[in-house]
């Protein structure tokens, strides 16, 4: 593997991890395992195991969930046209599955099928082929068995998935030093099955309604790691918000970001940003220029208010480490060494202009009360029902969806299987065209997205990516069909 392909997902914080396997009473020392698993000869062949484990963060004991003894899980790496064969074993004591967030692959069979159920102690082999024209980019994998999603991601189950391609071959980007930064918060007992009940039903439900945030924030499982930047050089940061509820409003001291890619891959040319907001599930890739005085510069998470429940807001605060009014240091960028000055790329990958939509739909995001369930989160006045198709679309059509948040909290909206482009925010077109699979809809605002439904038919979902809100009902069922007989 070339040096630029060794992406930093440090294992230093799991060097002393002890595994507590739910299927047995044995406690096992964590095994050294490869950080990056790459495809070979057109095949990405992976054994992945979901486990319960103990580790120490910030001097405290944490009981978490992880993949292959790692927090986060191994970084998977493939290329367009590769086949992915992943043998997944569940050892966490409750049902789970895998969602390949952002990959444009079938939502059916043993591909990105979120309706599969893998009981604890069982193994399932996922297999699918990435399309030859799949965009290069940063994607990720995490559980998606409804009703358990938030607990399992909050507990620690997450890993990055990179598709290599055309973007990586642009000379300036190829010469940059590259790091993946998986941003994830943890709570000490988040990995204990049923731990929410031990905190009291009222407090647990309040935390869910708000969307839980952990006491400790990590980058690649480490607290405040350091990344090196050569004077004159370029640093490529591939940023992933793998938290279940926490937002990251990112800023690097005295350095702008130069955005080069979003959820679905590259944009047409770099865009200079002073700040970058990532809601749960979102990704972005930026370049940082080593053109300041050599020294140390902090990567900061600035305060961000994602809303609250009116008068109940004080009862539903974020708790320790919350993001409402705290500036956190996530990592440090340290100048180390010197290189010939590397320029920014002038152009990247063209982003196509989508045709006018054949259908326009409206989705209202809100919350309400449900008899026997308490507060639930709603799309168009309805909580999720796995037996109901909410939206039916035609394969190889283009639609425009208007997402209107009439509630009191921000909701990041995620669509499975197909990427989309943001058409407008509160009626204003965005400053640049980009492919997305998750878009933030702030409370009191509206966002229009334009979606080409391509290649794959079947049943899948769209939902709020504050995962507690998803499990509490803010999800809809989508059927993609060759012909649409009835438009819902």
Image (tube, rainbow, N blue to C red):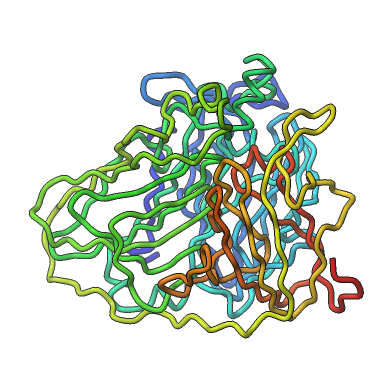
363 left or right, relative to 308 = right
Front position in the image: 190 or 33: 190
Q: Quadrant of residue 482?
A: bottom right
Q: Position of residue 404 (x, y in %)?
A: 63, 56
Front position in the image: 410 or 126: 410
Image height of 363 relative to 323, above or below: below
Q: Which quarter of the rendering shows the N terminus? A: bottom left
Going 40% across and 33% down the picture, which residue do you hit?
13
Would residue 67 be seen by someone viewing this image from the given angle? no
Going 48% across and 69% down the picture, which residue do you hit?
428
Going 79% across and 56% down the picture, which residue do you hit?
477
Front position in the image: 69 or 324: 324
Q: Position of residue 466 (x, y in %)?
A: 59, 43
Q: Which quarter of the rendering shows the C terminus? A: bottom right
Going 66% across and 76% down the picture, which residue do you hit?
452
Q: Position of residue 382 (x, y in %)?
A: 80, 47
Image height of 252 relative to 396, above or below: above
Q: Position of residue 349 (x, y in %)?
A: 43, 80
Q: Farthest residue toward the left? A: 293
Would residue 485 be seen by someone viewing this image from the given angle? yes
Q: Quadrant of residue 167?
A: bottom left
Count how many numbered circles sit on residues in the image: 0
Q: Quadrant of residue 315?
A: top right
186 left or right, relative to 360 = left
477 left or right, relative to 182 = right
């Amino acid at each position: 593997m070339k040096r630029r392909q060794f992406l930093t997902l440090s294992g230093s914080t799991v060097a002393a991890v002890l595994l507590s396997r739910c299927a047995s009473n044995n406690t096992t020392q964590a095994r050294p395992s490869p950080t990056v698993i790459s495809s070979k000869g057109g095949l990405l062949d992976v054994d992945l195991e979901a486990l319960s484990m103990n580790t120490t963060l910030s001097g405290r004991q944490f009981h978490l969930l992880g993949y292959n003894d790692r927090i986060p899980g191994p970084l998977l790496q493939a290329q367009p046209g590769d086949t992915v064969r992943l043998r997944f074993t569940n050892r966490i004591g409750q049902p789970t599955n895998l969602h390949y967030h952002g990959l444009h692959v079938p939502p059916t069979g043993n591909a990105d099928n979120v309706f599969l159920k893998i009981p604890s102690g069982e193994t399932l082999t996922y297999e699918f082929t990435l399309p030859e024209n799949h965009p290069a980019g940063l994607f990720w994998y995490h559980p998606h068995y409804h009703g358990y999603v938030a607990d399992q991601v909050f507990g620690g189950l997450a890993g990055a998935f990179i598709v290599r391609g055309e973007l990586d071959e642009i000379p300036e980007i190829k010469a940059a030093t590259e790091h993946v930064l998986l941003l994830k918060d943890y709570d000490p007992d988040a990995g204990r099955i049923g731990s929410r009940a031990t905190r009291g039903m009222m407090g647990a439900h309040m935390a869910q309604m708000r969307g839980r945030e952990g006491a400790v924030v990590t980058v690649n499982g480490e607290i405040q790691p350091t990344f090196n930047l050569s004077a004159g050089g370029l640093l490529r940061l591939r940023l992933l918000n793998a938290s279940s509820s926490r937002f990251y409003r990112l800023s690097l001291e005295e350095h702008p970001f130069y955005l080069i890619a979003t959820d679905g891959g590259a944009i047409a040319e770099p865009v200079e940003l002073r700040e970058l907001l990532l809601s749960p599930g979102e990704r972005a890739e930026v370049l940082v220029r080593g053109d300041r005085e050599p020294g140390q510069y902090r990567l900061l998470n600035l305060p961000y208010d994602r809303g609250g429940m009116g008068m109940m807001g004080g009862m539903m605060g974020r708790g320790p480490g919350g993001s409402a009014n705290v500036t956190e240091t996530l990592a440090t960028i340290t100048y180390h060494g010197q290189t010939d000055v590397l320029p920014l790329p002038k152009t990247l990958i063209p982003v196509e202009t989508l045709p006018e939509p054949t259908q326009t739909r409206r989705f209202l995001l809100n919350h309400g009360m449900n008899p026997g369930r308490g507060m639930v989160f709603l799309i168009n006045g309805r909580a999720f029902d796995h037996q109901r198709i909410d939206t039916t679309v035609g394969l190889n059509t283009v639609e425009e969806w208007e997402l209107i948040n009439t509630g009191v909290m921000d909701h990041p909206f995620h669509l499975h299987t197909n990427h989309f482009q943001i058409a407008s925010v509160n009626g204003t077109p965005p400053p640049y065209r980009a492919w997305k699979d998750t878009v933030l809809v702030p409370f009191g605002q509206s966002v229009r997205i334009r979606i080409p439904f391509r290649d794959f038919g079947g049943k899948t979902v769209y939902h709020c990516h504050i995962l507690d809100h998803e499990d509490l009902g803010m999800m809809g069922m989508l059927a993609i069909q060759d012909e649409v007989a009835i438009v819902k």
